[in-house]
Image (spheres, grey):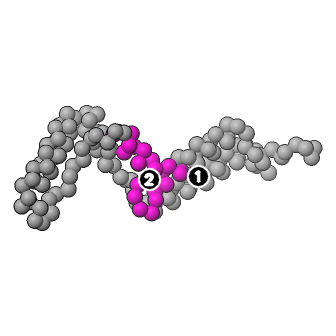
């Protein structure tokens, strides 16, 4: 082997680089932060309502807030608007659900699974691209 030639498997070729890049981007977007939502979930939340016009279901009234008729009416109007859209069913119901979606699994478990997936993909690319020596 000449000195100018790189050993086979040292650097993955173009298609394997794309596999590694795609895997890395998927892992980074799905990686749950210490607090809050992962980037993937934030993108889903935004994608179903980019203009921020869909209502969310308001929390229950706290102690003493039920005495303020103006506040109760505002909350009830928001609930009615939400219910109208929710009862349309189909895609609208799905959009309302996805607007407030959170990461479905325990963040610690997700991080571990994502790390294992990344290592497995890296190992597979290394083996297929000539890493057998």
Task: Report whether 78 appears left or right of 113.
Answer: left
Quadrant for residue 22, please give it. top right
Q: Main secondary structure of the magenta part?
A: helix
Regarding residue 101, the answer to whether it shows in the image is yes
Residue at numbered disc 2: 38
Instruction: Identify the secondary structure beneath mark 1.
Output: helix
* Label 2: how many Cα within 10 Å (few below 14, some 14–19, many 20+): some
Quadrant for residue 77, please give it. top left
Q: Nearer the viewer, mark 2 or mark 1?
A: 2
* Residue positioned most to the bottom: 63
The image shows residue 84 at horizontal and vertical percentages of 16, 38
Residue at 62% x, 44% y is: 21
Residue at numbered disc 1: 118
Residue at 32% x, 45% y is: 99
Q: Earlier in the sequence, mark 2 or mark 1?
A: 2
Is 132 in front, or is 2? 2
**Magenta residues, as a range?**
27-49
Residue at 83% x, 46% y is: 7
Task: Report whether 70 appears left or right of 110.
Answer: left
Instruction: Identify the secondary structure beneath mark 2.
Output: loop
Is 78 in front, or is 130? 78
Residue 126: give its label.
Answer: none
Q: Residue 75 colored magenta?
A: no
Residue at 40% x, 55% y is: 37
The image shows residue 76 at horizontal and vertical percentages of 12, 48
Task: Report whether 46 appears left or right of 123.
Answer: left
Which of the image's four quarters has the N terminus?
A: top right
The image shows residue 132 at horizontal and vertical percentages of 76, 49
* Label 1: how many Cα within 10 Å (few below 14, some 14–19, many 20+): some
Regarding residue 1, the answer to whether it shows in the image is no
């Amino acid at each position: 082997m000449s000195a100018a030639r790189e050993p086979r498997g040292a650097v993955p070729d173009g298609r394997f680089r794309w596999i590694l890049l795609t895997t890395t981007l998927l892992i980074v977007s799905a990686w749950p932060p210490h607090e809050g939502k992962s980037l993937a979930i934030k993108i889903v939340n935004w994608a179903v309502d980019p203009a921020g016009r869909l209502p969310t279901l308001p929390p229950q009234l706290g102690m003493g807030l039920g005495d303020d008729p103006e506040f109760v009416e505002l909350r009830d109007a928001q609930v009615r608007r939400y219910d109208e859209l929710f009862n349309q069913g189909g895609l609208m119901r799905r959009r309302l659900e996805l607007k407030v979606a959170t990461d479905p699994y325990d963040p610690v478990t997700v991080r571990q699974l994502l790390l294992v997936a990344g290592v497995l993909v890296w190992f597979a690319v290394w083996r297929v691209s000539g890493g057998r020596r």
